[in-house]
């Protein structure tokens, strides 16, 4: 197997300003290259990625901290290697774990984000069994199209079976032995995988390991989700935890400032804008003083405890999920249906949309803060 996954040899390639790379859920645009070695790129959602060229290594970089992003993207770690592959007519970036396995892919494109999303939907409509030997996959595709670790294992080995790999595991012998096109050869070492097959094989292997990390024991109550708890129950648990805090803050009169509640549960981006307002004000006026909680915060006017019922979670591509549920006014019996969007950040699910008294997001707290700081 090690021979099949030998080090990929790619031509030297310089990443250039204004190039765009699509990872299956976000379009990264190269904004700046400093001193010929630091590559800085961002998305429309203000995600950041900064790479530093590795001296003496052709087309190889490492991930370093960005200007305003505290966390390393993609579930990677700072210092992990990024390789620029330009080979066999393909041009893409590969984020690699310390053992060399691909764990994230980003394809060079000239398209805008809307077109990339459309192309991703088209790719997602393709069966993994048909795509795995010919189409460069990404994390978002595997998350949306391959449901279990066992399916991932079969998909990974299909790459090898297509080339006549002779399996040692009896279950794989039996499985592929029933497929008409599978013809096991006599020399596994003679098999040559193309660049797409090599990358997909490693990417699927990394996804299998990610599923292993996600298979943690279930937690009771409303504790914070454990590291990489990528389950529907983890999302539901965070929703319940959030509204428990809402009850404590408002209905029970804990005295916690609503903005502190938001900072505890909303995404890093919300906190970034919040901090930018305070910085612009130079401590003359805080966010709370400029953006009136009583009039505009979605929780304004809450006076009775609420109950969360019928939580239905949908895990989306990438580190995103949606939770639809019913809010019940426990004093008066009034009900209201709501939907929360959540992002997976720093080992837990955090809210990325902003509940309002009106469905018109143009009047939301975030939008008004964004306009104020010029975002």
Image (cartoon, helix red, strand yellow):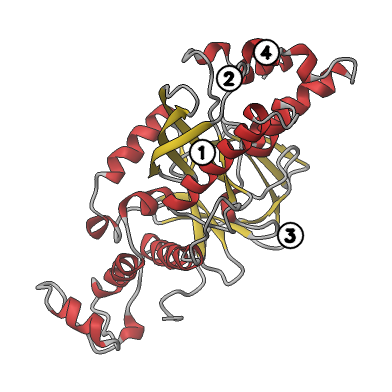
Q: Residue drawn at (30%, 89%), measured in percent from left and top?
A: 168
Of 350 and 26, nearer the camera is 350
* Foreground disc of the pair 1, 3: 1
Dot 4: element? helix
How much space separates mark 2 and mark 1, taking CA atoms?
Answer: 17 Å
Residue neighbourhood size for the residue with mark 3, other residues' Cα within 10 Å, grouped as few (<14), some (14–19), many (≥20): few
* Foreground disc of the pair 3, 4: 4
In percent of width and height, residue 205 lies at 43, 68
Q: Is residue 252 above or below residue 61?
A: above
Q: Is residue 17 visible?
A: no
Q: Is residue 205 visible?
A: yes
Q: Which residue is mark 1?
A: 342
Residue 55 is labelled as 3
Q: Residue drawn at (51%, 48%), measured in percent from left and top?
A: 237
Q: Earlier in the sequence, mark 1 or mark 4?
A: 4
In percent of width and height, residue 88 lies at 39, 56
140 relative to 180 in the view: left or right: right
In percent of width and height, residue 359 lies at 46, 15
Residue neighbourhood size for the residue with mark 1, other residues' Cα within 10 Å, grouped as few (<14), some (14–19), many (≥20): many
Residue 298 is labelled as 2
Residue 294 is labelled as 4
Q: Is residue 233 above or below residue 80?
A: above
Q: Earlier in the sequence, mark 3 or mark 4?
A: 3
Dot 1: element? strand
């Amino acid at each position: 197997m090690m021979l099949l996954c030998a080090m990929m040899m790619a031509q030297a390639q310089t990443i250039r300003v204004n190039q765009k790379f699509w990872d299956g859920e976000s379009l990264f645009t190269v904004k700046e290259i400093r001193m010929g070695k630091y590559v800085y790129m961002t998305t429309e959602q203000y995600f950041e990625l900064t790479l530093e060229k590795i001296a003496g290594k052709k087309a190889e970089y490492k991930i370093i901290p960005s200007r305003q992003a505290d966390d390393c993207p993609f579930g990677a770690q700072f210092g992990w290697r990024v390789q620029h592959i330009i080979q066999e007519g393909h041009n893409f970036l590969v984020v690699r774990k310390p053992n060399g396995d691909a764990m994230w892919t980003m394809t060079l494109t000239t398209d805008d984000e809307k077109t990339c999303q459309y192309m991703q939907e088209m790719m997602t409509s393709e069966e993994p069994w048909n795509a795995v030997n010919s189409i460069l996959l990404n994390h978002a595709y595997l998350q949306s199209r391959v449901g279990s670790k066992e399916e991932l294992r079969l998909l990974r080995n299909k790459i090898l079976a297509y080339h006549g790999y002779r399996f040692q595991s009896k279950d794989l012998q039996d499985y592929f032995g029933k497929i008409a096109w599978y013809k096991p050869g006599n020399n596994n070492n003679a098999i040559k995988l193309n660049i797409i097959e090599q990358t997909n094989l490693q990417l699927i292997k990394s996804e299998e390991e990610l599923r292993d990390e996600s298979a943690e024991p279930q937690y009771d109550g409303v504790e914070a989700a454990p590291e990489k708890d990528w389950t529907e129950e983890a999302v539901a648990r965070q929703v319940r935890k959030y509204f428990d805090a809402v009850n404590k803050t408002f209905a029970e009169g804990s005295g916690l400032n609503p903005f502190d509640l938001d900072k505890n549960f909303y995404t890093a981006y919300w906190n970034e804008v919040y901090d930018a307002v305070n910085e612009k004000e130079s401590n003359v006026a805080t966010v709370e003083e400029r953006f009136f909680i009583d009039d505009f915060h979605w929780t304004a006017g809450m006076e009775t405890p609420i109950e969360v019922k019928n939580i239905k979670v949908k895990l989306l591509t990438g580190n995103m999920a949606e939770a639809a549920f019913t809010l019940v006014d426990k004093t008066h019996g009034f009900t209201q249906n709501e939907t929360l969007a959540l992002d997976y950040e720093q080992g837990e699910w955090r809210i990325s949309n902003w509940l309002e008294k009106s469905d018109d997001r143009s009047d939301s707290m975030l939008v008004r803060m964004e306009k104020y700081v010029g975002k």
